[in-house]
Amino acid sequence: MHAITHGTARVSTLRIWMQEARCEFLRLWRTPAFTVPSLLFPSLFYLLFGVLLGRGGGGEAARYLFAGYAVFGVSGVALFGFGVTVALDRSEGLLTLKRAQPMPAGAYLAAKVGMAMLFSLVMFALLSAFAVGLGGVRLAPAAWLGLLAVVVLAVLPMGALGLWLGTLVGGRGAPALINLVYLPMAFLSGLFVPLSMLPQVLRTFAPLWPSYHLARLAQLQVGFAEGVAPWLHVVVLLCVAVLFLSLARRRLATS
């Protein structure tokens, strides 16, 4: 009897986690202000800058920007998906309501991770279709798997950063604050132009951005960034995720 009860409890807990993730996904899927920019903008920007304006050069621009916009896209999904929703939940009292419910520990955060990964995979699929069909990008199967791994990994540090940013301001101020971090970080990390084209002072501080480490991992998969030690960038990204998750938990515990 005890084993049956224990097994039923595990099934019920898993079902709660799945339902929470489903609700979180549907919540943002039905929000055009999030869905349209997150899913379409990376592909449209890639079409303009990577395909239409990047012709020639043996397809190097198309491959380089494919990696860059993959990181750009998943960063936007994670930053806004975590940051804005957490800020809104705090402002509207939803977070307090969820705390009062007998919900398993970690379900709220796990739902956001699942939501961000699903949106990131959809974004990456659209971007890949543009890259292959219009940009002429051709990669080995291992490179595709490597890029997919980078997209999944990016959710952790960027989601943790977005979560922390969402604890600093209310729902109305969250989009502006996240944009102030998101856009400069993308440009200064070498997502759109090689870092060698930026001033020396900006190149010096580039490793401070988590998107820089994601960019190096993604660029390595498409034939750039030779000599990069992947494990070092992965360690840095995991440390960033732990740091900002800890800061966000401290903020949430006192709010």
Image (cartoon, rainbow, N blue to C red):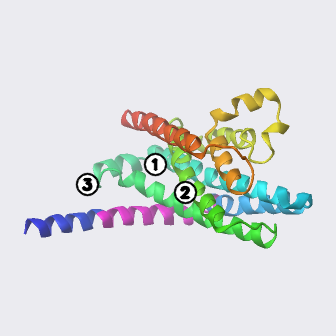
- Total marks shown come to 3
Residue occupying the far front of the picture: 227
Q: Quadrant of residue 176?
A: top right
The three-letter code of the residue at mark 3 reads: Pro
Name the residue type under label 2. Val
Q: Residue at 63% across / 32% down in the picture?
A: 208
Choose mark 1 or mark 2, whichever is in front: 2
Report which residue position mark 2 lands on. 152
Whether residue 170 appears in this view of the structure is no
Tell me if residue 20 is in the magenta stretch: yes
- Measure the C-alpha gap from mark 1 to mark 3: 18 Å
Magenta segment: does it hold 31?
yes
The residue pinned by badge 3 equals 102
Quadrant that contains the N terminus: bottom left
> According to the image, label 1 marks what residue?
89
Where 149 sits versus 251, above or below?
below
Query: Dot 1: what SS?
Result: helix
Q: CA distance from mark 1 to mark 2?
A: 25 Å
Q: Quadrant of residue 20?
A: bottom left
Residue furthest to the left = 1
